[in-house]
Image (cartoon, grey):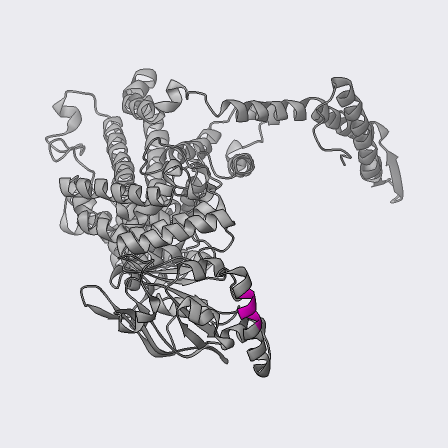
Amino acid sequence: MAPETKIATNTMTKDPILKVEHLSMRFGGLMAINDLSFEAYRGDITALIGPNGAGKTTVFNCVTGFYKPTMGMITMRQKAGKEFLLERMTDFEVNRDAKVARTFQNIRLFSGLTVLENLLVAQHNALMKASGYTVLGLLGMPAYKKAAAESIDIAKYWLEKANLIERADDPAGDLPYGAQRRLEIARAMCTGPEFLCLDEPAAGLNPRESLALNDLLRSIRNDSGTSILLIEHDMSVVMEISDHVVVLEYGQKISDGTPDHVKNDPKVIAAYLGVEDDEVEEVIEEIEVIAESEGPQGGTH
Amino acid sequence: MSITTNTNESAGGNLTARALREGIFAGIVALGLFVLFVGLETTQNIRNELVLNQRWGLLAIFVIIAAVGRFLTVAYFQPSMAARKAAASKTAVDTEESFFKRNFSKIAIAALLIYPPLMVMLFGVQGSLKWVDNFGIQILIYVMLAWGLNIVVGLAGLLDLGYVAFYAVGAYSYALLSQQFGFSFWLLLPLAGILAAFWGMILGFPVLRLKGDYLAIVTLAFGEIIRLVLINWTEVTRGTFGVSGIPKASVFGIWSFDVSAPNNFAKAFGLPMSSAYYKIFLFYLILALALLTAYVTIRLRRMPIGRAWEALREDEIACRSLGINTVTTKLTAFSIGAMFGGFAGSFFAVRQGFVSPESFVFLESAIILAIVVLGGMGSLVGIAVAAVVMVGGTELLREMTFLKAVFGPDFTPELYRMLIFGLAMVVVMVWKPRGFVGSREPTAFLRERKAVSGSFTKEGHG
């Protein structure tokens, strides 16, 4: 798969890995998500963007089983064709059975465990099976020893990808912020997911770390074949790496398409810049002028 | 009180001047504080009149103590502490640990193995009883209990205030089953562990959805419920009278310690009759049980389940996001911890020959938990040291009869035991807030095994 040559307009013909249909989530009187439907395609990096409070993280929590949606259906289709209705599963089953992994907006590492141990914990279910639910492992069976050695190899692979191999034996809480973000992604990947949900992976990163993150995400998609859904505020990340962008505002989808399409969607511009409906046309013109003078870098900010 | 608390690193004269200044200042403050409290005493004279006694000498002593104390603190104590701290941080980086420190656990096990013969040599067969039983066995029971609780509190981060309930289940399982059915200790030991683990699960299922303080309160209640059941279910447990005449354990059925038995241990070896041999046997038994606990804990920590426990302590939500079933993970921690409590309980019944609900009060749970916290949550060595200090310390304080010479014949050191002990605990927690061993050994490493500082590990939230 060569991502650079792929034309994102053909997404309609692609195979959806995640299908969200008529999703609604109500917290008391607040409708955090209101009848949201979108699809994420296999092999794509799908970005979920929107102003603060638009309900992005709520969508995430519904997809990953941390919230039970009030209404709607979330279907995850694995490569092998097996389908899972995520809204009916609890959080750990979503990861264990449906192979959907996630990271958190505020990093949640096991700070008192070393970097390597963090990645080994992520392989819990595979190792539990290999250790015969601890019994065979306690007896020192060779099958478990082999699995344990393999798990360290997997951890090593991801440590190298995330450029953390030098810090493998340090406590996770001792890492700088950017490295913690990368470690959280590596840890999620160690669960062997088919679908990876990243909640603001670039938040708090400096531009250089942000670029490294782009490379990491691309290589995850290309080498592991894992599809990615990400929430992001950093438009340089979103526009650079995503194949497909879904824009939310007040819990509803206002735009859906390629980055270029979304960038020029008057509704999106209005949502971000907060203009009156009749001024939207003007804004679009302005943006086009800026885009022509600055090249493709001009985002919606 | 101190105007400039920052340690002054300039010339010594400057320091002395500052110390003098602060000393005088402290003296003035002490004078102001104590002039009315100490300097003047109000009493009644014989005609019921209020009389003011002036006690300037006593006041002077107070003021001098404050001033000199402050002077010494600023001039000598603080600089030496700062120097020691600086030296420690400098040397900690690359000092090779001493031989003793590196091989501490091996040396400790070897010392424990030769402990009973050594005591017999030093104090004679009968004289060794106190040292083997009151100190050795007593401490090892608590070591084992604390190691068992460590799985629940130290590794999985679940605050359990009712651990003694499982100890009670184990003790009564042995006491009742051995009397009712005449099963031997070696059959009932695993059975008691299984029953305790079973009760751990029964408690765990409804309770483990609670967190933190709520979990602690429910486990506390569970401990009390078990005790109250033992008191009130008199047909089975004989209530507060307890169960007495519990059969002794035998050396795998080969030698018995019953005086009347033909295969009596002392008779078989032609030794004089003494209960000391039984106690020495019990010492090695509890040592083996405690080491089993440690071995299983060490092995489990390197297994996925043990790592999941520690991950659970660090962050439960992250665990769930990684596909770990936190309920079963907590349940296993609870039931394995309970199992070791059950083993220790059945040993306790065999050692005492008598169990009653009084042995399983909340104070026991609190002491076991205090040992775990004092030792450093998760650290086996630290916990063992803490158990020696706590249990051995309180026992030693009984021996402080020489204090009678200091405080007069009315002084009973036993009464002050708990006071001294509480004070010592406060001091230790101020000095080492993370317990004796605050750092954590990683369970796997790529290049080198570096201990994880206690400032990164979390205590868990239930």
A112 sits left or right of B283 in the view: right
Q: Is residue B238 visible?
A: no
Q: Quadrant of the N terminus of chain B?
A: top right
Which is nearer the eye, A80 or B264? A80
A215 sits left or right of B31 in the view: left
Which is nearer the eye, A42 or B72? A42
Which x, y percent locates residue B200? 29, 55
A2, above or below B133, in the image: below
**Residues drawn in magenta:** A286-291
Q: Looking at the magenta stretch, what is its main secondary structure?
A: helix
- The residue positioned 17% from the left and 39% from the top of the image is A140
B395, above or below B247, in the image: above
Which x, y percent locates residue A261? 43, 71
Snapshot quadrant of residue B461? bottom left
B197, above or below A258, in the image: above
Q: Which residue reaches farthest top?
A: B121
Q: Is residue B433 visible?
A: yes
Which x, y percent locates residue A246? 41, 71
Which x, y percent locates residue B140? 33, 34
Can residue A220 be found in the magenta stretch? no
Q: Quadrant of the C terminus of chain B?
A: bottom left
Can residue A287 be found in the magenta stretch? yes
Q: Which residue reaches farthest bottom?
A: A278
- The residue positioned 58% from the left and 31% from the top of the image is B410
